[in-house]
Amino acid sequence: MSEVEGLAKFGLFLFLAFILPGIIYVGFVTFYYPEILRQFGWDLNSWVGFLGLSVFFGLLITSICFVLENLLFSLLKRYKDLKRPEIIMLGVFEVRNKRTFYLNQLVGQYICHFNVGMGVLILTLAYPFYSYINGNVSMLNPLKFVFGIAISIVNLYLSLGVFRNWSLNAIKRYEDER
């Protein structure tokens, strides 16, 4: 594998796992909590501010999502059919000189959709509490809440259903291929 190919795989994985979810989190923070951005002086009018905030929220919220994913699979480990993609296999296949660009993209989408789904769920569930604490219950918009729940459900379904299954099947096929 060339350095360029390795960097491209690493960049794709980081983009899908942290940066893209971070961009979506910034959108939902702006959607639900615009006054927080003003209070902290965060500027979304520049690429540097937007990218910095995306990385900040991406790393912060996806860390929480990773803990929740581990808890979820720990609680449901008695269900033998419920497995998650083993990211370590990407390294195993690399050592075996198998190209893993497709697998990086597939596993990255599993992580991306899980992080988006769980992160948006966290931001959405906090929205009514935040409104209540700030005395803005009359400003609470039920459509915003329903929108966030819908986005969360769709992304969790895509992650835990579609991309989890595709990733597991692809890893099995990579293993079976000698």
Image (cartoon, rainbow, N blue to C red):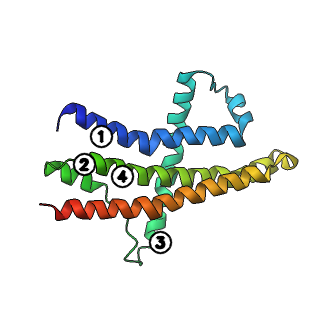
Amino acid type assigned to the residue bearing label 1 in the image: Lys
Quarter holding the C terminus? bottom left
Amino acid type assigned to the residue bearing label 2 in the image: Thr
State the image coordinates of residue 85 (x, y, percent, origin top left): 34, 60
Closer to the N terminus: mark 3 or mark 2?
3
Indicate left or right for 82 with 152 as reference: left
State the image coordinates of residue 31 (x, y, percent, origin top left): 70, 40
Please tell me the numbered disc located at residue 168. Answer: none
The residue under label 4 is: 106
Q: Report if the CB atoms under discs 2 and 1 are less than 8 Å apart.
A: yes
Q: Would residue 140 be visible to someone looking at this image?
A: yes
Q: Would residue 85 be visible to someone looking at this image?
A: no
Q: CA distance from mark 2 to mark 4?
A: 10 Å
Amino acid type assigned to the residue bearing label 3 in the image: Leu
State the image coordinates of residue 28 (x, y, percent, origin top left): 64, 42
Q: Residues within 10 Å of mark 1 (few under 14, many from 20)?
A: some
Q: Nearer the viewer, mark 4 or mark 3?
A: 4
Please tell me the numbered disc located at residue 9. Answer: 1
Provide the secondary structure element on which disc 4 rests: helix
Closer to the N terminus: mark 4 or mark 3?
3
Q: Report if the CB atoms under discs 3 and 1 are less than 8 Å apart.
A: no
Provide the secondary structure element on which disc 3 rests: helix
Q: Report if the CB atoms under discs 4 and 3 are less than 8 Å apart.
A: no
State the image coordinates of residue 81 (x, y, percent, origin top left): 38, 75
Closer to the N terminus: mark 2 or mark 1?
1
Closer to the N terminus: mark 3 or mark 1?
1
The residue under label 3 is: 75
Vertical comparison of 12 with 78: above or below: above
Provide the secondary structure element on which disc 2 rests: loop
Amino acid type assigned to the residue bearing label 4 in the image: Leu
